[in-house]
Amino acid sequence: MNKVVKNVEDALVGIEDGMTLMLGGFGLCGIPENSIGQLVKLGTKNLTCISNNAGVDDFGIGLMLQAKQVKKMISSYVGENDEFERQMLSGELEVDLIPQGSLAERCRAGGAGIPAFFTPAGYGTEVAEGKEVRVFNGKPHILESALTADFAIVKAWKGDTEGNLIYKAAARNFNPMMAMAGKITVAEVEELVPAGTLDPNHIHTPGIFVQRIFQGEKFEKRIEQRTVRKND
Amino acid sequence: MALDKNGIAQRIAQELKNGWYVNLGIGIPTLVANYIPQGIDVEFQSENGILGMGPFPFDGEEDADLINAGKQTITTVPGASFFDSATSFAMIRGQHVQLTVLGAMEVSQNGDIANWKIPGKMVKGMGGAMDLVASAENIIVAMMHSNKAGESKILKACTLPLTGVGCVKKVVTELAVLEIKDGKFHLIERAPGVSVEEIISKTEGDLVVPEVVPEMHFD
């Protein structure tokens, strides 16, 4: 089945104010930067964004925060974004901070038809407030519910016309689980190839999870913390 | 003399055992990788989806797609693997990772740890810390004994929002190695030249001090 759409404009058709979006990436690594640029252009408002981080002030989801498009963020870590912290502390932005492993599993569960699961992460902390606690093997666990989204927007290295995806290195992160959890999943890829080009043994996300795929126009792939060692 | 951050990392590195998979947190814990003792083979897990993390890349060889949990550009060692975040935390929750080293703002004598939030002031989020501390068999906290205001961070009870309860077993600071058991801190070692009196005076929590407290030993 051909999942190819012409460009980022066509890929995001149907995203409306008030929707819930999942956006892949860890920090600025593996984020769907073309789609984020288009969302800023569209000016869609009151969005709930599920993403491990919120970008930096002038890149990634940070651009959507600057434009006040986000009503609520569901994330695990937001440390490198001053505007995020300002909006959160002033109460302009609703924020649900959840442990990173729970976030990943909640997305996976959402895509896998598992409505909830128990995890030890967060027991005895603010995260556990209002959640059911149950003891397994002598250890307390809290009940976490699945997450789904109206649109999941992911970024992959290579993809084919069937929507099969291959990620590169640490840019995989949350993208595979989010691809599973979107009612409509949009994949932006660096390289779009005809079906049959990618080795089926190497596919990370099978095309069944992807409804629309396009090749991004350009990828800046900004580095947040450039660390190097000396040549000796 | 009190240790510097590298000294703390070097002391923690002595805890590494052959064949361990190890998760290092951001800050001082990252430095532990620089002091792996000879003959010890360990592999570093980065919770954003890497096993077999190597050193920083040479200038010009940075790859935006290859970063660690602190968002720093890194490399991999031969035999490394990449995976998604759910698999990464399956390794952590499923106790396939033998040691977690992380920083803290406060630690209490029953093993509680706080390191993710200062209400009204600083909210960075917990990242993977809550998953790590809830499941790791061995957790070593790398931290300074006191905060910038000079107040002890080694407490009877944490005052900040918790990251995990009853999970920390060992703390290494610039002054001492402490073990937590039976609801108390136990002084195991002191930094070279640091007096037991200084450690007692800077520890707010209950501290059990044996008659002889050996100095840390560095090769």
Image (cartoon, coloured by chain):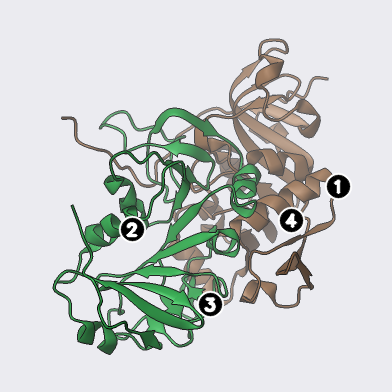
Chain colours: A brown, B green
Q: Earlier in the sequence, mark 1 or mark 3?
A: 3
| Chain of the residue displaying label 4 | A
Point 77% across, 70% down: residue: A135
Task: Let me know if marks 2 and 4 both belong to one chain.
Answer: no
Please tell me whether mark 4 sits on a helix, a strand or a loop: loop
The residue to which callout 1 is attached is A113
Task: Let me know if marks 2 and 3 both belong to one chain.
Answer: no
Closer to the eye: label 2 or 4: 2
Residue type marked 4? Asp
Q: CA distance from mark 1 to mark 3?
A: 37 Å
Q: CA distance from mark 4 to mark 1?
A: 26 Å
A69 or B43: which is nearer to us? B43
The residue to which callout 4 is attached is A17
Residue type marked 3? Ser
Point 57% across, 75% down: residue: B165
Residue type marked 2? Ile
The residue to which callout 2 is attached is B12
Whether the residues at callouts 4 and 1 have beta carbons within 8 Å, the answer is no
Q: CA distance from mark 3 to mark 4?
A: 23 Å
